[in-house]
Image (cartoon, helix red, strand yellow):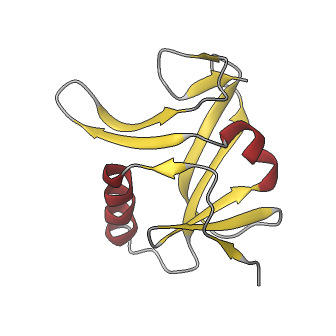
Amino acid sequence: MTEVKTDCPISLTEEALTEFRRIFVEKNLDHQQGLRIGVKGGGCAGFSYMLGFDTLKEGDEIYEAAGLKIYMNKAHTLYLAGMEIAYENGLNARGFSFNNPNADKTCGCGTSFSA
């Protein structure tokens, strides 16, 4: 069993935590599932964020943030450390947003960045 860490390298706003919990319940996910946060090559700025519920994979670190299990590949920490994920639910914006201090450049869509 991999150790669960509470010193998560990213932070989630209360609104984001609430939305992730809502999705977890709505999709009727089991407790083997955790929130996967990562990056992948692609997007208009070089990297895109990965965000979704998944099972534990080889190379993952397990974190816990306010009762939410988070899976993150160790190699992705370089690109994500210090990032804040927020959730907007207003007239001008709706969805998750990423405030990443490691991003040198971001795209207008808000889900693509270069580091």
Residue at the front extreme? 7
Decide which of 55, 106 is in the foreground and name it: 106
Decide which of 110, 63 is in the foreground and name it: 63
Asked which quadrant contains residue 74, the reply is: bottom right
| Relative vertical location of residue 53 with respect to residue 45 in this rendering, above or below | below
Residue at the bottom extreme? 1
Decide which of 27, 73 is in the foreground and name it: 73
Q: Is residue 1 left or right of residue 86?
A: right
| Relative vertical location of residue 3 with respect to residue 49 in this rendering, above or below | below
Residue 21 horizontal/vertical position (percent)? 36, 65
Q: Is residue 32 left or right of residue 18?
A: right
Residue 16 horizontal/vertical position (percent)? 37, 51
Q: Identify the residue at horizontal 67%, vertical 68% (top origin).
A: 62
Residue 7 horizontal/vertical position (percent)? 63, 62
Q: Identify the residue at horizontal 31%, vertical 51% (top origin).
A: 15
Residue 49 horizontal/vertical position (percent)? 60, 37
Q: Identify the residue at horizontal 64%, vertical 69% (top origin).
A: 55
Say which quadrant the C terminus sits in.
top right
| Relative vertical location of residue 115 with respect to residue 75 in this rendering, above or below | above
| Relative vertical location of residue 77 with respect to residue 68 in this rendering, above or below | above
Say which quadrant the N terminus sits in.
bottom right
Asked which quadrant contains residue 39, the reply is: top right
Q: Is residue 67 left or right of residue 15?
A: right
Count of numbered marks: 0
